[in-house]
Image (spheres, rainbow, N blue to C red):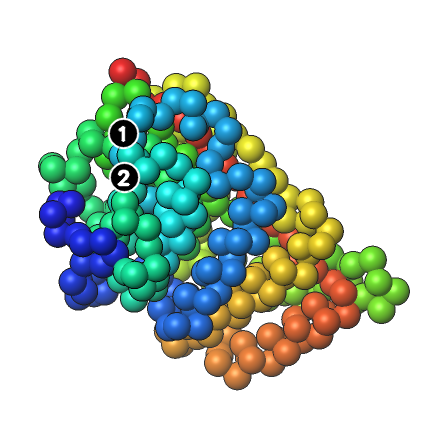
Amino acid sequence: MNDNDTTNGHTNDQTDGKKDEPYWLGRASVEQQRLLKQHGIWTKSIGYLLHPSITPTLPPNARIADVATGTGIWLADVAKVSPPSYSFHGYDISSEQYLPAESLPENVSLGFLDFKKPIPEDLQGTFDLVNVRLIIISMGPVSVWQDTLKNLMRLLKPGGVITWTDGNFLVARGFRGSSDTSTSGHALTTGQLQLNNTLIKRFGYSFPDMGDLFRDAGLKDVKEDVISTDRLVEQRREFTEIGVGAVFGGLGNLSKAGEEGYWSKEEVEKRKEEAVKDMESGAYLRWDIHVAVGVKAE
């Protein structure tokens, strides 16, 4: 798809992107609301929409791509605080989560792109900045991360910047909160470990060293921030709500596969109730957020 296939907002629905869709969290309207809430919470915790090193490098007419854009909310928020001469282009394999076209700034368009497939020639080398966030659910072994990064780099102009934000859920677990009534969070941990183990078994789930990933791909001036989701105490409950929704939503969808070692739908519901009790007691779920930045060689 080229930029002429987009209007302010949406392209026509693309059905071929759903045949082997890797998004095991589902695409219902409830999921859109979770994604919008997640965006705000993650951005507050990280402390910025764009890593501070990026903005000074952008030209006056910067072309910015957001891959796996989801709802398009990141683009919309960045556009509101950027020069009107910038153009913003969001891409995903499905338009089902997109915000209404009329809610988007005029310089934001949303279109279709599968980042695991070859980048169309008319998009190669056309962007000053490529942003990608929270695509770990579509990853697998380290080789998939490597191939994905190399493919995304094809979107960049020489000297362009790529930034990748993701959560390392392999280190996630529950913790006892500060309240005297808090449990130790073991039910939160159990659900997270079940999801991790299921994804490792099914997809070869992994989380590489992001700095090494970028450097090995030939990117220059590599920077990485690592933020703990419990950094801001007031956000612990919010991150836990997001985590519980993602963990048990994912386990519920994966239960449909009915494979050995997977939790059944009934088991998922039972375990979710236990995890919610942990959360209500004051226990919380914690993991790491990584923000990596690199520059494509001139």
Mark 1 lies on residue: 61
| Circle 1 crowding by C-alpha within 10 Å: few under 14, some 14–19, many from 20 | few
As helix, strand or loop, the secondary structure at mark 2 comes to strand
Of the two numbered discs 2 and 1 on the same chain, state the one appearing first in sequence. Answer: 1
Of 103 and 147, which appears nearest the observer?
103
Look at 57% across and 53% down and name the residue there.
41
Of 27 and 90, which appears nearest the observer?
90
Number of marks present in the image shown: 2
Q: Is residue 176 left or right of residue 10?
A: right
Residue 152: x and y, percent? 28, 37
Q: Mark 2 and mark 1 in contact? Answer it, CB < 8 Å.
A: yes
- What's the residue type where badge 2 is placed? Ser
Residue 240: x and y, percent? 63, 61
Give the answer, above or below, for where 129 lies relative to 10: above
Mark 2 lies on residue: 87
Look at 41% across and 44% down and name the residue there.
80
Look at 48% across and 79% down and name the residue there.
264
As helix, strand or loop, the secondary structure at mark 1 comes to loop
Q: Which mark is residue 20?
A: none
Which quadrant would residue 202 be assigned to in this image? Answer: bottom left
Q: Is residue 118 left or right of residue 106?
A: left
Which quadrant would residue 254 be assigned to in this image? Answer: bottom left
- What's the residue type where badge 1 is placed? Asn
Q: Is residue 32 left or right of residue 178?
A: left
Can residue 259 be seen here? The reply is no
Give the answer, above or below, for where 162 lies relative to 102: above
Of 89 and 122, which appears nearest the observer?
89
Residue 106: x and y, percent? 28, 49
| Circle 2 crowding by C-alpha within 10 Å: few under 14, some 14–19, many from 20 | some
State the separation of the CA atoms marked 2 and 1: 7 Å
Residue 74: x and y, percent? 41, 48
Look at 64% across and 78% down and name the residue there.
273
